[in-house]
Amino acid sequence: MPIRYSLGTLPTFSVDPDQFDVLQSARHFREYLLEAINKATTRIYLVTLYLENDEAGREVLTALYEAKLRNPELDIAVCVDWHRAQRGLVGAEKSKGNAAFYQAYANKYDVTIPVYGVPVRNREVFGVLHLKGFVVDDTVIYSGASLNNVYLHYQDRYRFDRYHVIQNASLADSMADFVRQDMIGQAAVQNLSQTDLPSTKEIKSSIRKFRIALSRSFYRGKTEQIQEGHVAVTPLVGVGKRNNILNKQILTLLANAKEEIVLCTPYFNLPKSVLREVKRAIKRGVKVDIIVGDKTANDFYIAPDQPFKAIGGLPYLYEINLRKFSVINEKFIKTGQLSIHLWKHDTNSYHLKGLWVDRRTMLLTGNNVNPRAWALDLENGLLIDDPEKRLETKFNAEFDNIFKHTQRVSTFSQLEMLQDYPSKIQRLLKKVIRTRADRLLKRIL
């Protein structure tokens, strides 16, 4: 039975495989996005964790303002996380964050482009806007990437993600309507381009109501008859543990797998329910490939010759998780039924997410498939049902590109142990594990 039949009243759209493209690099993603903005005629909706005040971020915001100047009727809105936009980078000095950047641009130009701060919770640590997807006219550009130098490969380093382009008016309408109705139309959501912003405390009640509304929200649209030769695409959204359609669909995909699972996650910190389904799949004979970043390709990694910061312990904590998993499943690693692939390319970082089951069903998502994504953040995804495998060639090419910089773990002993780590990391992690703080960190980071 096709997976989409279990989605109830959620809209499913018929998509021509020729209108589905995969971009293979961060630089290509940046070039495509800028070109799409420059050619836009009706609407541009960008939803991302953050739009950074750096060269790449300024390039994107400048392109938006110039597009608005050329066509004042162009409907443009940017959505970013409320909390993330009003602070500096982790470990940096206190600042007004990217909000000051948005306000400076608003003062500089004669046209107005709102940059909405979306507060998913009263505090950032308990939930952020992790929704993904850009809508430009009738095109959906979907990636887990945020907008800054490293995600867009503006300079020497890049953060590798996945980049998909779907040209379909109905899907674009559904995703744009969600932004308008379920996000920027809510009282808790504020325009960060303005200077007279309320404090989080002042809108605390509105944020609570917004969170409740989000937990009941879903993408709208009329379910279409899937045309011959087309694939079915269903947009999913979820926040929190209860009645989370996206979480349930991930578990359903894993539970229904018969031959093969390919799972991408940047941080090996799977929720217990996901870990349980992965183990069940392995035991019933499903071949499982897990692609995860090497600890040195983690965005929190700090090289030993750089100044030490506590946040730099996280990649090592994730590697400890991965090693434990590898030890338990060593016999399946030896037979090849379980393959763990570590991605590493020079000093670049890895941010891939997603699930491919039986080469038929693909979930494109920004969900890290970790406890934080599972219970705290606002997440979404695009479920693709491809029974005739019309997209297999494109996905094979994408994964060939991903595997190009991976190394397969042939035994758990390839992964370092606590005593192999730099002395400062060892001391930090011993303290964290002794106080059981690692349990809390795994839930919120």
Image (cartoon, rainbow, N blue to C red):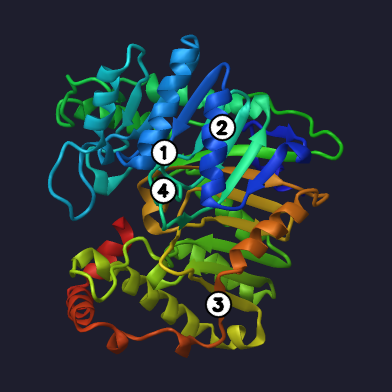
Q: Amino acid at mark 3?
A: Gln
Given contact means CB atoms under 8 Å apart, are the residues at marks 3 and 1 in contact?
A: no
Which label was assigned to residue 95?
A: none
Q: Amino acid at mark 1?
A: Thr
Q: Secondary structure at mark 3?
A: strand
Identity of the residue furthest to the right in this view: 228
Rounded to the nearest angstrom, the CA distance separating label 4 from label 1 is 22 Å
Rounded to the nearest angstrom, the CA distance separating label 2 from label 1 is 18 Å
At 85% across and 40% down in the image, what residue appears?
A: 229
Q: Is residue 174 visible?
A: yes
Q: Reply above or below: 1 against 296.
A: above
Earlier residue among tags 2 and 4: 2
Drawn side of residue 12 relative to residue 439, left or right: right
Residue 40 horizontal/vertical position (percent): 56, 22
Which label was assigned to residue 48?
A: 1
Q: Secondary structure at mark 4?
A: loop
